[in-house]
Amino acid sequence: MTINDNEWTLRPGARGRRTAGYTARTGDGPLRPRAASWTAGAGVFLFGLVGASAPNPNTLRVPITWLRLPAMPGTVSEAAMAAAVVLSCGATLGLLHAHSRGWSPDPRTLFRAGALAVLLLANLTPVGSSDTASYAAYGRIAALGGDPYVTTPAQLGGAYAHVVGDAWRNSPSVYGPVATWWQAAAAFVGGNQPWLTIWVLMLANAAAFLGVGLLLMRMADDPVRAALLWSANPLLIGVLVGGGHLDTVVAVLAVCVVHLARGTGGRRRDLTIGGLVGLACGIKASAALLGAGVLWLLLRRGAWGRAACVVGAATLTVAVLYGTYGLHALDPLSKASHMVSMPSLWGVFEHYATVAAGPRAAAASVSVLWPVLMLALALVLHRHVPAGAPVVVTVPFVLSFAWIIAAPWSMPWYAAVACALAALFCPGRLSRLLVVATAGLALFHTSGGHGW
């Protein structure tokens, strides 16, 4: 994959040994990943089993009504989720290793297999998080004409408030206006039935996941590897689809930005790219990392006018989006930015810093230090990026990857954008490390919202 210096265009170039014709062989011949394939199936099965056995400690309190098994005991649920994460991580690593040793299946077959897993989990009760319940409550508030940036699920009351995780029942929305409209559309369909709103959100999220998979297979130099990192990645399917997270929609916009960057430059294209970055920020503020690759590439080439065009379009889009609610819509996000997830090294640091210097100084120290650590990690990760990889992909990739490692509040589904970008330029070592990091976060942060 190479970059035209006159335009910010990605073009298929000379393919390496692993991707040439997608049939590379080693001296021992292709490695058959039969065990990894069965392990992937076992991982997806366990994710589905937990979802079908709701309610349990790793699902919402109110289950999706069809395909229900008896409720799973807490210890069994915890063991099944841990096993699902470990098996899915091992399977993904095994499949990637087999591909690096010459295994080259039809990527369409991988996509179909992943699609079956996606359809299964999208029709079950969400697992690993209660975020979909919060989405549904905020959507219901907006659908009734309320302001989810002021009104909390507890104030909404009723069936929707009952489903929301304990820690978030008194918290207004931290998501952007685009996310609120997405949630409100689902709540309009679901009406006063939270399970139906959640199911609509799950189906929409599954469609977005499959859409990203199709785009990645068309755009990547190595569609097999792209499918293994996204469409047929059991860990990502379990975390993103099984949990129904909005990060999947951000990944859609990230891939669209890169897709537009493959074409020849132009004012209209620059404005569109800036608008898409702004829309992504209208879902989650962390999507600002997406624009870093575009901006860095243009500034490095001295294209100040084009950089200003992209930044201006993104800024205007964000201003218009948040203008529909007002600046107070940023208040919940500002408060949430000081939160520290547990277990976390930042939690340990904050504890001792609070003892030594007080809570304000401790919070301020964390706020200053974690971005510094993120940038340092991004520089280290960038050293392992393959030579010639496109800047428009690699810069947001390393920033997104470093963010999920360094941020005080980090969840496994935050890896969505990094996984989508990794599928495009295929950094072998970094992609495996990303899978392990995602699995590590999943082992510590999977619950149905009951443990927060």
Image (cartoon, rainbow, N blue to C red):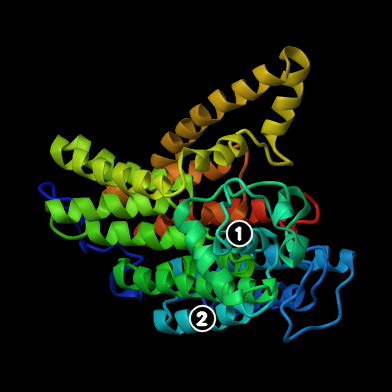
The structure residue drawn at horizontal position 72% and vertical position 47%, both measured from the top left corner, is 170
Is 165 positioned to the left or the right of 36 in the image?
Answer: right
The structure residue drawn at horizontal position 43% and vertical position 42%, both measured from the top left corner, is 399
Q: CA distance from mark 1 to mark 2?
A: 32 Å
Q: Residue furthest front?
A: 145
- Determine which quarter of the picture holds residue 48: bottom right
Amino acid type shown at disc 1:
Ile
Compared to residue 212, the image places residue 110 above or below, namely: below
Is 319 positioned to the left or the right of 134 in the image?
Answer: left
How crowded pointer 2 is (Cα within 10 Å; few <14, some 14-19, many 20+) is rated as: many
Counting every numbered tag in the picture gives 2
- Which is closer to the viewer, label 1 or label 2? 1
Is 101 positioned to the left or the right of 433 in the image?
Answer: left
Tag 1 residue = 141
Residue 157, given in percent of the width and then of the height, sits at 74, 59
Helix, strand or loop at label 1? It is: helix
Q: Residue furthest left?
A: 6
Amino acid type shown at disc 2:
Ala
Numbered badge on residue 75: none
**Residue 377 or 188: which is nearer the viewer?**
188
Tag 2 residue = 115
Does the image show residue 118? yes
Residue 351, given in percent of the width and then of the height, sits at 76, 25
Give the quarter of the figure containing the N terminus: bottom left
